[in-house]
Amino acid sequence: MALLYAIRLHAAPRRQRLGPRVHFWPFEGWDIPVGHSAVAEVYPALWSRGFARDGRTGDQHDAFSIAAWLSRAARDGTLASFLNPDLTPHERDGSVLAA
């Protein structure tokens, strides 16, 4: 469902309203330009168990887990390998941030 929403956002004329500094990963390329925000489909279940729940609702914890994981991966230098995984062109079809 989220992927379909991202595709709809990417479609013109909605895309133009978001401006040039929003990157739809991986539709607009596997590398996110410096200084751009990114829209990507993610599966929070991949990371949510690794963070304490601390009284958050399920949705709150999913959002927290994604943000915390992305922040940690950006700091420790592993984010780039998740954003540009070593996959064949066939494997890249339908990719989500989970490689």
Image: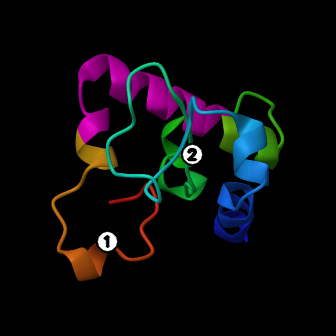
Q: Which residue is drawn at 78% across and 51% down?
A: 14
Q: Is residue 61 in view?
A: no
Which one is in front, 93 or 77? 93
Reply above or below: 30 against 99.
above
How many numbered circles are shown?
A: 2
Q: Which residue is drawn at 48% across and 40% down?
A: 50
Tag 1 residue:
92
Q: Does residue 88 appear to the left or right of 10 in the view shown?
A: left
Instruction: Find residue 5 and report its horizontal and vertical position in percent.
Output: 74, 63
Distance from disc 2 to disc 1, alpha carbons, whole Å, reads 24 Å
Residue receiving disc 2: 48
What is the magenta range? 64-80
Instruction: Tell me the quarter of the image containing the C terminus.
Output: bottom left
From the top left corner, tell me how far across and down residue 1 is, in percent: 73, 71
- Of the image marks 2 and 1, the number of the one nearer the N terminus: 2
Quadrant in which residue 52 is drawn: top right
Q: Which of 61 and 96 is in front in this view?
A: 96
